[in-house]
Image: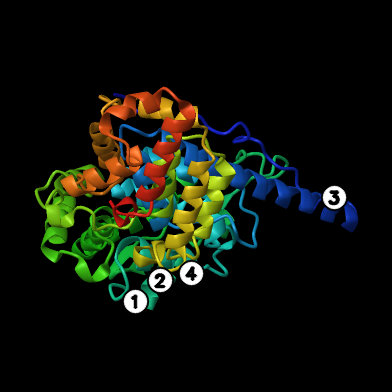
């Protein structure tokens, strides 16, 4: 079954008018305030758009991996500089398109991504004053990790990334277009650089295409060749922690090493690594099932996709639990692991899910339950619901427990009569869910 590509938000190509060209300070301030309001409004709309796309993705891991890459190549809209939602959308689309593609291509693309240029100050990096932010994070957080490079490598990399810009004004840099990355020759340091012990030669042809080919792609190639083992282990450990168990003390080094070997042998293609992990006996071992805490997005989208609830409520709950899409806490992304479920977030999540379940219409709960096979058999219905929402296949004891909750003390044969009365059947299904969201297994995967 094909997973259709999401339709972009309606405003995705809407540009801005330049505020600082207006003649008076009051006019400039008014225009700037309007721009910032629009920026934040559209970024909040984009968050809700993505939550809906997560809910629609029933046939792949596309949205799960899009979230992974968003947390890896971290970018956020909540910064002092203007961050258009149009650029955040384009970055999100980049991750979606390359979520199982080639890591080399992904790194090359993110170096000149518009949102990344703004977030890590590449937008202002020129040959007289190269900004080191992206160069440092490329090595420390995005590819090989601390201890595998020097400060000199960071400095030389910063020189490589000079001169790249992005634009979101319709009346500025009109030659290059809006929401596109472009290259300013006069701002680029075209002299030779030494990176990870290897020379990037000086450039005689300073065209955008040639600089990207020789310097950007050349730098990425050096990382992948000179630090292949370090990079493959670094990325594969993050994938392991994302899909198996996020406890950093419980990473299986042998499994990660096999994944890393597959990564290197397949020219840094992501799909074979995922296949190696997700098809392995290790992944399906009972001891590894039900150990991973769900992220707030997995928890909230996972249940609300079945019922009627407003997008702003979903967004608010996820933010309160510590995961605001498009706005991670810092350049390192979300810490995850037990941050997702502690003495504050666990009772909050239970309380909020309980509240929204009670607010569902009784008849809608019955309609939802009737989608299951043998919905008129209370025990079989409970088994199917528990299998859908709990981390592990329900035990006989769990099935009996939740069947009693569903029936409220009535005998099994009364269930068909309960379903005929919305206020009775719907209420009993709510009781079932309210108890289920308190189960630790509901919060694990």
Q: Give the Cα distance between marks 3 and 2.
A: 39 Å
Tell me the tag on residue 22. 3
Question: In the displayed structure, would residue 343 be above or below residue 326?
Answer: below
Position of the N terminus by quadrant: top left
Residue 86 seen by the camera: no
What residue would you read off at disc 1?
A: 150
Tell me the tag on residue 154. 2
Q: Give the Cα distance between marks 2 and 1.
A: 7 Å
**Which type of secondary structure does the marked residue at label 3 adopt?**
loop
Q: How many marks?
A: 4
Image side of residue 172 versus residue 342, left or right:
right
Q: Earlier in the sequence, mark 4 or mark 2?
A: 4
Give the image location of residue 301, x and y in percent: 43, 43
Image side of residue 312 versus residue 18, left or right:
left
Quadrant location of residue 347?
Answer: bottom left
Q: Earlier in the sequence, mark 1 or mark 4?
A: 4
What residue would you read off at disc 4?
A: 132
Q: Earlier in the sequence, mark 1 or mark 3?
A: 3
Q: Earlier in the sequence, mark 3 or mark 2?
A: 3
Give the image location of residue 267, x and y in percent: 20, 48
**Which type of secondary structure does the marked residue at label 1 adopt?**
loop
Q: Are marks 4 and 2 in contact (CB under 8 Å)?
A: yes
């Amino acid at each position: 079954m094909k997973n259709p590509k999401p339709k972009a938000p309606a405003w995705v190509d809407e540009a801005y008018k330049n505020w600082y060209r207006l003649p008076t300070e009051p006019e400039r301030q008014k225009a700037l305030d309007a721009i910032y309001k629009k920026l934040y409004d559209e970024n909040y709309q984009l968050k809700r758009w993505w939550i809906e796309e997560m809910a629609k993705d029933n046939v792949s891991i596309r949205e799960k991996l899009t979230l992974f890459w968003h947390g890896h190549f971290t970018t956020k809209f909540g910064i002092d500089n203007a961050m258009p939602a149009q650029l955040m959308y384009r970055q999100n689309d980049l991750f979606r398109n390359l979520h199982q593609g080639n890591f080399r291509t992904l790194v090359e693309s993110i170096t000149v991504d518009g949102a990344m240029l703004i977030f890590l100050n590449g937008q202002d990096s020129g040959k007289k004053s190269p900004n080191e932010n992206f160069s440092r994070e490329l090595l420390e957080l995005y590819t090989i990790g601390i201890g595998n490079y020097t400060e000199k490598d960071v400095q030389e990399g910063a020189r490589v990334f000079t001169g790249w810009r992005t634009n979101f004004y319709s009346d500025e840099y009109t030659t290059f277009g809006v929401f596109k990355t472009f290259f300013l020759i006069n701002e680029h340091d075209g002299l030779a650089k030494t990176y990870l012990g290897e020379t990037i030669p000086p450039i005689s042809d300073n065209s955008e295409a040639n600089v990207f080919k020789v310097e950007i792609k050349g730098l990425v190639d050096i990382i992948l060749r000179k630090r292949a083992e370090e990079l493959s282990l670094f990325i594969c450990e993050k994938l392991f922690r994302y899909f198996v168990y996020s406890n950093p003390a419980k990473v299986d080094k042998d499994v990660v090493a096999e994944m890393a070997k597959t990564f290197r042998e397949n020219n840094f293609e992501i799909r074979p690594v995922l296949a190696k992990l997700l098809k392995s006996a290790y992944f399906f071992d009972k001891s590894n099932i039900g150990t991973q805490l769900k992220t707030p997005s997995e928890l909230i989208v996972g249940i609300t996709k079945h019922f009627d609830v407003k997008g702003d409520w979903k967004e608010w709950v996820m933010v309160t639990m510590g995961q605001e899409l498009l706005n991670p806490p810092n350049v390192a992304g979300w810490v995850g692991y037990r941050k997702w479920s502690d003495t504050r977030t666990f009772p909050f999540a239970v309380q909020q899910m309980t509240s929204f379940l009670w607010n569902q219409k009784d008849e809608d709960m019955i309609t939802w339950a009737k989608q299951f096979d043998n919905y008129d058999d209370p025990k079989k219905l409970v088994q199917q619901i528990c299998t859908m929402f709990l981390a592990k296949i329900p035990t006989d004891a769990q099935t009996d427990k939740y069947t009693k909750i569903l029936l409220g003390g009535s005998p099994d044969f009364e269930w068909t009569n309960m379903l005929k009365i919305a206020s009775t059947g719907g209420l009993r299904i709510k009781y079932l869910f309210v108890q289920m969201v308190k189960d630790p297994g509901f919060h694990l995967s």
